[in-house]
Image: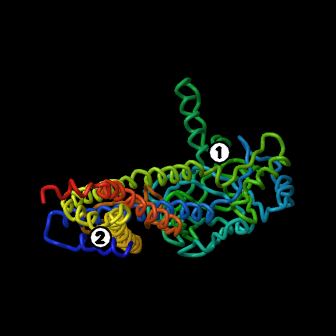
Amino acid sequence: MRSFSLFLALRYLKPKRTFLSIITLISVLGVTLGITVLILVISVMTGFDRELQRKVLGFEPHIVISNDSLLEGWRDIVGKIVNEPGVVAAAPFVQGPVIVEVQEHVLTPVMRGIDPVEELKINDLKKLVVEGNFDLGGDNTVMGSLLASSLGIKVGDKITVYAPNNIRGIIEELHREERDPKAKAKTLQELKGDIVVPQDLTVTGIFESGRYDYDANILLVPLYIGQELYGLGDAVHGISVRTTDPYLAVSVKEKLSERLRDGVYAQTWIDRNSDRFDAVRLERNMMFFILFFIIIVAAFSIMNTLITVTVQKRREIGILKALGANVWQIVWVFLAQGMVVGFFGNLTGLALGMALIRFRNEFKDWLASVLHIQIFPASIYEFSRIPAEVVPLDVAVICLSAFVICSIAALIPAYFAARLDPVKALRYE
């Protein structure tokens, strides 16, 4: 029964120079474009989400211990942390904005003061260095590649780093003089008690993490320099913690919270980047539902095509029913047409989608060089290349859903065609 119905369905779908053939071709193209766009967008969004996680985990610790001000007695806290099951290492850090001056260039990057020996147990920052070496001994610094480019810095150059508190001290001095013009201005020697002496540092390495936010803003310095610039003494801003598995950080955080003193709290890498992760996943789900309507529109095109076929083939349907064809044989003739359109739409859409994913960055570069269109600026999306990751389950859901929708769209006109009365169909023949 099905072979007979399929035979007729394929006969009806054979390319002919008719308006109906053009509609059929448009139906196939509609399914193709819908599947192509869905596979491309979902793969890029999935790749963006997972690449963001990898970049975060490649630079940030799994857990950060801090409080609302400064961590005093942080060595005792480190001793408690490293003995907790699931914790691999813990290291102190100082982090905050500073002013960097190189000749006529002045920028305000984020300084991160670390203990290089302990920090390497948290993240292997050496593998991120693309120029020079990861050397934070003495008065040395390692900076991001985009920050170095903005300052015109190369390995071996010197930079001057000013503490942000200096600006506050100078402003307070200016306000004092404004309130009391007769007051004696402080000498440089007197201001030294309020102003931190700038640090001259030598650039020993340039790193590249692949994430714009880090490469354009992070300046790594030894821990003691960070403490001096911020006037912290022996205190630190926080403690970085590495766990055996980054995805077990939440459970480790709960255990650590029970052992930490009042006012000290823990945050996982998921907590600190939850806004980004949630936004990417929400956008991914929204794009899936919005773009899925392309396939639904293509399904309506298939339905329209088959309705036209049933009207044109009214006489043939009447003859088949008069010769003894049952309802399901007629249904399968038109249902098979919709399924064939859905199958070829799936096949071509899958092939085109995978091809675009493979050459996505080449296409982006071509648009940028020839048409001067920036579709993925690194300053906004934080990645220099378009990430993508194909999940077989996502592709299977897209293709199977499209095939089912095309089949359902074909079933409605097929059902009404099968119920056609042969007497009415052949009355005027």
The residue beneath circle 2 is 9
Quarter placement of the N terminus: bottom left
Query: Closest to the observer: 306 or 178?
Result: 306
Q: Sequence-wise, which precedes: disc 1 or disc 2?
A: 2
In the image: residue 120, left or right of residue 85: left
Q: How far apart are marks 1 and 2 (CA)?
A: 91 Å
The reply, left or right, for residue 27 in relation to residue 168 is: left
SS state under label 2? helix
Whether residue 53 is visible: yes
Q: What residue type is labelled 2?
A: Ala
* Residue 5 spot, x, y in % from top left: 33, 71
**Which amino acid lies under the numbered mark 1 shown in the image of this protein?**
Lys
| Residue 54, quarter of the rendered image | bottom right
Mark 1 is surrounded, within 10 Å at the Cα level, by few (under 14), some (14 to 19) or many (20 or more) other residues, namely few
Q: Position of residue 188 (x, y in %)?
A: 60, 43
SS at badge 1: loop
Disc tally is 2
Say which mark, if any, is on residue 192: 1
